[in-house]
Image (spheres, helix red, strand yellow):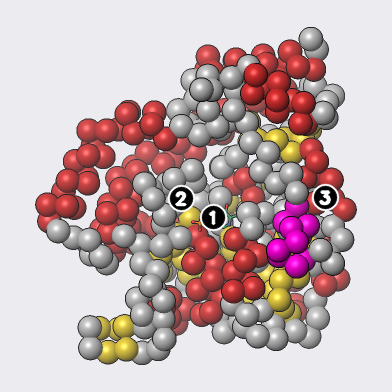
């Protein structure tokens, strides 16, 4: 058992148990399970929050990305640009849609190096999927300008960035679609799988609504071949309830990032992510707190011994996994990051005492 675990679902449930149980019971006693009013309510809430016209609830962030590509008509013969330094789903969806993933390197902020995009654009390129890793948006001015200039679609992988913004415009409101995940560990998480697409395009919203429910417009009218990718009504009810706390949780995550920054920034062995207020264009939500560390693996085991659970998410970069057949990409910075990154615990329920303990352990490792 860890003293401090990397995620802790039980603490939040314990804190909110009474209200959560009530929300669940309400849904179950009404018998509202599939595509009922809680889904609709949640979609409205999400669209308003992100600042777009439509949101469509889906069964995962992966399907949000996949169905966005399908709705944009992307498939065989097309190329889609994204990064290797991401959760593998950002790449998977391109392959599953029948297109070819083109991977670009990451910059010093862990995100897509925007300078590298134009160099890989070909006649076949159809779309860019920028990934807002760890809750920080990409420079979307740059990316949208590149997309406009080259007539490319932008599909935002905002699975880690609900509530983040760039120049006061929220993640999920820039591209043709924004794709969100409500996997339990995400900033707004349900008790299972969930996702959503946001968009200002009524046709795309309509298509994805059809896609998620077997192409059915009504019980008697099938418009196209679809999939089964609905957000459960029960999960939607839980998300509606959690939405109340969501802004508070982001604030807390940013406070924790500030504490890590204040305590660890001076250590020469570490390179921290951008501090919460270091660049006024970015509002980061700190889905994860990922830093670069010298002697990373030793630090991981030292912290483990001290009872602190950390995460080394991608010790092998995605494009090096044999089964993915992407090893022809040479991405030196991504490969370097894979050797150095480590994620410290980051969730709103962390107490100051726990934070002190984590920080002291890190300090002790480098200055025994
Ligand atoms: C979590 C995540 C996804 C996938 O979301 P799921 O809901 O787990 O399918 C996609 N991209 C990124 C960057 C993610 O972090």
The CA distance from mark 3 to mark 1 is 23 Å
Quadrant of residue 206 within the rendered picture = bottom left
Asked if the residue at label 3 sits under 8 Å from ligand 1, the reply is no
Nearer the observer, 70 or 203? 70
For label 3, count other residues whose C-alpha is less than 10 Å away and answer few (under 14), some (14-19) or many (20+).
Answer: many
What percent of the width, then of the height, locates residue 88? Answer: 64, 58
**Residue 351 on image: x %, y %:** 49, 20
| Residue name at image x 79 percent, y 44 percent | 337
Q: Nearer the viewer, mark 1 or mark 2?
A: 2
Q: Residues within 10 Å of mark 2 (few under 14, many from 20)?
A: many
| Some atom of ligand 1 lies within 8 Å of the CB belonging to the residue at label 1 | yes
Check residue 39 for magenta coloring.
no
- Left or right of 10? Residue 156 is right
Mark with earlier residue (2, 3): 2
Check contact, mark 1 vs mark 2: CB within 8 A.
yes
Asked if residue 290 shows in the view, the reply is no
**Which mark's residue is nearer the viewer, 3 or 1?**
3
Say which residue appears at 38% left-offset and 72% top-offset: 228
Side (left or right) of 287 relative to 34:
right
Q: Residue furthest front?
A: 323
- Residue at image mark 3: 335
**Could you tell me which residue is drawn at 50 percent across and 73 percent down?**
67
Report which residue position mark 2 lands on.
183
């Amino acid at each position: 058992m860890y003293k401090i675990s990397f995620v802790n679902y039980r603490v939040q449930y314990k804190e909110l148990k009474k209200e959560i149980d009530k929300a669940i019971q309400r849904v179950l006693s009404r018998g509202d399970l599939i595509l009922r009013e809680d889904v609709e309510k949640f979609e409205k809430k999400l669209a308003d929050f992100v600042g777009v016209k439509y949101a469509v609830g889906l069964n995962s962030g992966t399907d949000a990305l996949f169905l966005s590509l399908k709705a944009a008509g992307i498939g065989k013969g097309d190329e889609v640009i994204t990064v290797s330094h991401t959760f593998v789903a950002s790449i998977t969806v391109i392959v599953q849609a029948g297109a070819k993933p083109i991977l670009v390197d990451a910059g010093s902020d862990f995100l897509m190096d925007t300078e590298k995009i134009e160099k890989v654009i070909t006649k076949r390129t159809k779309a860019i999927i920028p990934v807002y890793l760890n809750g920080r948006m990409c420079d979307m001015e740059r990316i949208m300008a590149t997309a406009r200039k080259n007539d490319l679609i932008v599909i935002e992988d905002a699975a880690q960035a609900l509530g983040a913004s760039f120049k006061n415009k929220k993640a999920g409101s820039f591209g043709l679609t924004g794709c969100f995940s409500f996997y339990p560990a995400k900033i707004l998480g349900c008790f299972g799988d969930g996702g959503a697409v946001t968009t200002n395009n009524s046709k795309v919203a309509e298509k994805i609504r059809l896609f998620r429910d077997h192409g059915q417009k009504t019980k008697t009218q099938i418009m196209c071949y679809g999939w089964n990718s609905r957000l459960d009504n029960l999960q939607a009810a839980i998300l509606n309830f959690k939405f109340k706390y969501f802004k508070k949780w982001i604030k807390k995550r940013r406070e924790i990032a500030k504490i890590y920054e204040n305590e660890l920034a001076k250590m020469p062995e570490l390179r921290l992510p951008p501090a919460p207020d270091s660049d006024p264009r970015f509002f980061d939500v700190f889905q994860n707190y990922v830093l670069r560390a010298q002697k990373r693996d030793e630090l991981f085991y030292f912290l483990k011994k001290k009872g602190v659970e950390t995460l080394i998410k991608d010790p092998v970069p995605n494009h090096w996994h044999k089964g993915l057949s992407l090893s022809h990409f040479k991405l030196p910075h991504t490969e370097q990051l894979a050797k150095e990154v480590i994620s410290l615990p980051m969730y709103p329920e962390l107490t100051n005492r726990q934070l002190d303990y984590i920080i002291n352990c890190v300090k002790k490792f480098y200055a025994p």
